[in-house]
Image: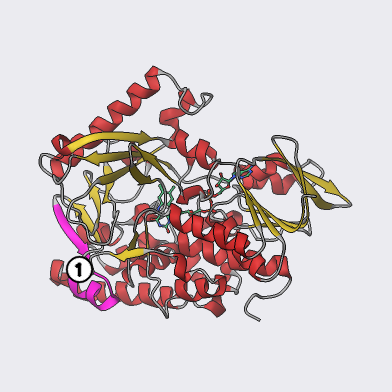
Amino acid sequence: MNRYTTIIIGGGLGGLLCGILLSKKGQKVCILEKHKHVGGNLQGFTRKGEYFDTGMHYIGTHKPGSILHKVFEIFGANEFLDTQDLDSNGFDTISFRGKDYKFAVGFENFEKQMIDYFPSEKDGIIRYVKTIRDIYKSLSIDTIFNPILENQHLCESAYEFISSCTSNEALQNVLAGNSPLYAGEKSITSLYMHALISGFYIEGAARFVGGSHQFAEKLAAQITENGGCVKTDCEIVSLNIKDSKISSCTDTKGTVYEAESFVSSIHPAVLMKIIPETGLRKAYQKRIENLKNTTGIFTVYAVMKPDTFPYINSNFYVYRNNDVWLSKETESDTFPSSYIFMTSAQTKQQQFAKTIKIMTYMNFEQVRRWENTLKKKRGEDYENFKIQKAEQILQAVGEKFEGFREKVQEYYTSSPLTFRDYTATPEGSIYGIVRDFHKQAESYIPVRTKIPNLFLTGQNINLHGILGVSIVSLLSCSAVLGYNIRE
Ligand SMILES: Cc1cc2nc3c(=O)[nH]c(=O)nc-3n(C[C@H](O)[C@H](O)[C@H](O)COP(=O)(O)OP(=O)(O)OC[C@H]3O[C@@H](n4cnc5c(N)ncnc54)[C@H](O)[C@@H]3O)c2cc1C
């Protein structure tokens, strides 16, 4: 009999974290994942023996005492993270107008290094770093449970704050140089989002070793050990309602799963499509369906000729234009107007890069003409489109790292269509729902719904990334259990 205490739809980070905590609390939990593997954006793929991460690749600090470590302590998941610290003098390198600026680990070091680059901007840099640190440090296990909308910095603009610290355009851009971590847009990104993510990485940045999929697999194994189950190849196509509550859900094969509570970690707009019309108010459904999503991404996964390109313990954010923020204008610039370049860590001591990932923003409009095609069957014109884009990217990388193209043995690519089909995110959006500081209340989605036993979790609820999704998972589990998880 497929009957559980809680069923979790979707086995990405959000679903797995909820699964681990609820099963630890003694619930009989079952995770139902559409894809062949768990992980969602923690998935990777292997070609000819080489492994590639597709989504999450590096995280901020998870050292004892950090917020992530404390949150993971509650899940019992700290031991599952296998990472390597990135270069403490430059975990990220921002390449802007032909010059490299390194982000140092630690607020003091970061400040000092920025002052070295921009000595005349000392006062503004000090103010910037203090504000970022204060906002980031205000996040604690206690404040996590405060209503997120109470934070004043959610309604302030990141761009305007940075501009108030310095009028130096290069410095303004450098400080926001790793804004692709949150698809930052000048006109909508809040200071809170910028500060939380920047502060998290400045305090310590680390890369997954051997692939982020291992983390997902360890979480799934622990759920099974706790008495729960994880079913893959199990796409949920309907939620069934009885007496104003969700009684069960059904997968594509017609199998029915019953539970007392249901947690959805899938994109809320996708959830709206599988809930019966009687389930939620029309106005709520419409609001969710109309929320804007973040942009998509095009990735080149390069296999390097042996011992030709060094392993670099830093992520490069390379800008070929004059503005680091995402905007319609930057999208139409010469492609790629910017890209992220990362050598992958297969082991902890690595001299040469075996594989390299290069990512650039790509709006869904660029691939819309193939939106009704299936994976691996999109046709020759799509394959040619991808080759053309990949070659443009490799050429751009060659402008930064001389002779790069010749060192690439072969490559694979993914587009927003790939993400749409592997994670079921509308239009292959990278981080799900857009957060606009002008409309915080509108884009805010609570973990509880009007259906008393249906809860939400995952990157679309509040914040994406390892930190955001972990915090949301704590809130979702507290709502399911009916008490603050800390008590
Ligand atoms: C390219 C890229 C790079 C990133 N880099 C970083 C990074 O460096 N650091 C960082 O912290 N974050 C990063 N992120 C963000 C981070 O990966 C995500 O925020 C996080 O993994 C989202 O987890 P989730 O569980 O909310 O959603 P997802 O990972 O999307 O999981 C949802 C799951 O639900 C499943 N599903 C969907 N529909 C159904 C259905 N009907 N039935 C059953 N299952 C279903 C999907 O298959 C999927 O497995 C990156 C994301 C992307 C795309």
Splitting the image into 4 quarters, where does residue 446 fall?
Answer: bottom right
Toward the top, the furthest residue is 380
Q: Residue at x 69, y 39 (%)?
A: 273
Residue 376 left/right relative to 76: left
Q: Residue at x 34, y 28 (%)?
A: 386
Which residue is label 1 attached to? Answer: 89
Q: Answer above or below: position of 420 versus 129.
A: above
- Based on the picture, tell me whether residue 100 belongs to the magenta stretch: yes
Foreground: 436 or 82? 82
Residue 290 left/right relative to 380: right
Residue 182 appearing in the image: yes
Q: Position of residue 443 (x, y in %)?
A: 58, 54
Q: Answer above or below: position of 353 versus 369.
A: below
Residue 228 left/right relative to 149: right
Report the span colored magenta: 99-114
Foreground: 219 or 332? 219
Splitting the image into 4 quarters, where does residue 449 fall?
Answer: bottom right
User: SS of the residue at dot 1?
Assistant: loop
Q: Position of residue 122 (x, y in %)?
A: 19, 74
